[in-house]
Image (cartoon, rainbow, N blue to C red):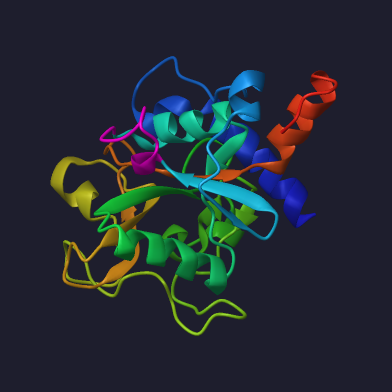
Amino acid sequence: MVMQTWLLVACAAALATLTMAQKPGRFLSLPNAQKCANRPKEFFYRGRNYFFSGHVPALRGKKFDWLDGRNLCREYCMDLVSMETQEENNLIFKLIQENDVPYIWTSGRLCDFKGCEGRKDLEPKNLYGWFWSANREKITPTNQIANGWGYNPWSQTGHKKQRQPDNAEFDINGTTESCLSILNNVYNDGIAWHDVACYHEKPVVCEDNDELLNYIASTNPGIRL
């Protein structure tokens, strides 16, 4: 039932691109078979390939808003990275630290668009309203430590000098901080999760997406992925 609920949420997210990215007329991209077969495979973890856009020559130095970053990944049968375990989170933190990456987008998203209204299980949103858009899994309430984790990855500070998520930009220009970014010591807080307005541009880490890979495999007989 939980997965079905979040599947509906994800469908709503695809239709709510104006709310997500503040640019009209954009939707989630379909995977490209050739790109999927030749996708960058920088490192491998638990059956999935990953790459950091800054390490791909054609993408080095480029930044993307959250939706464009997600669509870049999707064309390669991937999606923005989701950190469901502490081990995976540590892996991404290590990549950021060793390469002095200032920030990246993740697939984390706040359920604040059409289809999320009136959901008591998501209130208050800053605690219960976050999910991984790549696989439609809920994120542990932001004020709790997830099962199997030894720490809370959300930063304890930010622009408003309070625990994240703080939706700080809403107080500045009325823009909701609806997307989850990892920032590297921007607030002298080490490497940590922050809520950020989705229009900001950042490099991305892409992760294999089973649904997209299976789709391309089923519609392109003989393709090697």
Return the x and y of residue 146 as percentages of the image width and height.
Answer: 56, 76
Question: Going 67% across and 60% down the picture, which residue do you hit?
Answer: 46
Can you say whether 133 is above or below 58 in the image?
below
Q: Which sits in the foreground, 133 or 13?
A: 133
Return the x and y of residue 224 as percentages of the image width and height.
Answer: 75, 30
Magenta stretch encompasses residue 61: yes
Quadrant placement of the C terminus: top right
| Residue 71 in view | yes
Quadrant placement of the N terminus: bottom right
- Residue 50 placement, left or right of 26: right
Return the x and y of residue 132 as percentages of the image width and height.
Answer: 56, 51
Q: Which sits in the foreground, 63 or 14?
A: 63
Q: How many marks?
A: 0
Question: Going 34% across and 59% down the picture, which residue do you hit?
Answer: 96
Can you say whether 212 is above or below 9 in the image?
above
Per the rendered image, the range of residues in magenta is 53-62
Question: Going 22% across and 73% down the picture, which residue do you hit?
Answer: 189
Magenta stretch encompasses residue 213: no
Can you say whether 143 is above or below 167 in the image?
below
Can you say whether 216 is above or below 141 in the image?
above
